[in-house]
Amino acid sequence: MKTIKNILMLLGVVFVAGTLIFAVQSTDAIAVKDKIVANDSVQKNVAKSYKISSIDIPQDLNFAGEVVPQEDPEIMERVDREFLVNTYWQSNALLLIKRANKFFPIIEPILAKNGIPDDFKYLAVAESGLTNVVSPAGATGFWQIMRETGREYGLEVNSNVDERYHLEKSTEVACKYLNRWKDKYGSWALTAAAYNAGPGAINKYMGIQQVDNYWDLLLGDETGRYVFRIMAIKEILANPEKYGFHVEQEDMYKAIPTFNVEINKPVTDFADFAQEYEINYKILKRHNPWLREPHLNNGSGKKYTLEIPNKGYYRETK
């Protein structure tokens, strides 16, 4: 009897264990199936709501009024590349659209005054993304001006003051530089290429290849893409909704109203100076990035003009 009882108990344990294993396996199978269904649903939803497609290139594509030879298939592949890259780099394009709203109103009248086509504001976008960056070669500011070039065209460039960071003054220098090389080349596209690679390189390539226009030149990758990239940026920023970018005016970056303060003597401490105008050092430097140190030497008595934000546009600082 005891043996039969033990056998029955063992069979009971086996039955319970089997039931548990089957239940776990069934639960896992259901979970896996649910996951597959969920993933499939996500994939279907993404495919339904987000469409990646080719870009329709405008038929009247031009740079500063110079017509692009769109009948050339090699040219059109290069155009297509820049339109695709810049359209589908959405985060960057959105930032450029927002920054352009803030800085183009400063750049545009300076270009117009100097007889530079409006398209060249997009050259600044291509050069720096409308930020005060410094390249590995030392080119600085929105217009990526080299130290020697800045000094040649009248900018003060030293460790204390670097006017390549001064948007209005650096834009004036860029205009002078562009007009100089437009007079030589007679072409705005070649002038833009010379701005990027340097006139020495462009002269060399033109001499070797015996051609006299940008579209026929075989250039390095960066300069070879340069004008095409500017045209793509121009088209996207000028027609954002056409390329899928919807930015409300309230989301645009805006210039903060300022007034000017002139100084013609040294400033020993810009942190103290800023507090006189109820702002802090960081805000002072944001509006005057050409001030490179926390003090101003100015042993010569030169007159500088500082931008100070109108009262009330920043929280109270201490």
Image: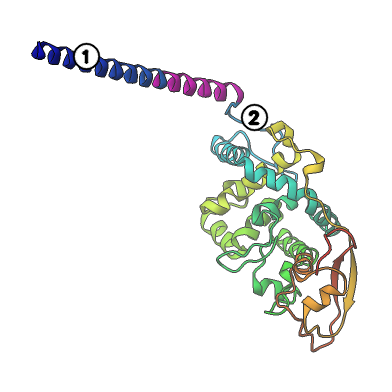
Name the main secondary structure of what is drawn in magenta: helix
Q: Nearer the viewer, residue 118 or 20?
A: 20
**Residue 41 in view in this figure:** yes
Residue 118, image x, y percentages: 79, 50
| x and y, in percent, of residue 299 in the image | 79, 89
Q: Nearer the viewer, residue 105 or 75?
A: 105
Q: Which mark is residue 47?
A: none
> Label 2, label 1: how many angstroms apart (C-alpha)?
73 Å
Numbered badge on residue 56: 2
Horizontal side of residue 1 vs 20, given as left or right? left
Quadrant position of the N terminus in the picture: top left
Question: Which residue in the protein does label 1 denote?
Answer: 12
- Residue 159, horizontal then vertical, whole percent: 67, 79
Up-down relation of residue 273 to residue 38 (above or below): below
Amino acid type, residue under disc 1 in the picture: Gly
Q: Nearer the viewer, residue 122 or 152?
A: 122
Magenta-colored span: 32-49
Q: Secondary structure at mark 1?
A: helix
Residue 119 shows in this picture? no
**Tally of marks:** 2
Is 68 left or right of 275, judged from the image as shown?
Answer: left
* In the rendered image, the vertical position of residue 10 relative to residue 56, given as above or below: above
Residue occupying the point 81% across, 42% down: 250
Residue 113 position by quadrant:
bottom right
Q: Residues within 10 Å of mark 2 (few under 14, many from 20)?
A: few
Helix, strand or loop at label 2? It is loop
Q: What residue do we see at 89% from left, 73% from top?
A: 261
Q: Which amino acid is tagged 2?
A: Asp
Which quadrant would residue 168 be assigned to in this image? bottom right
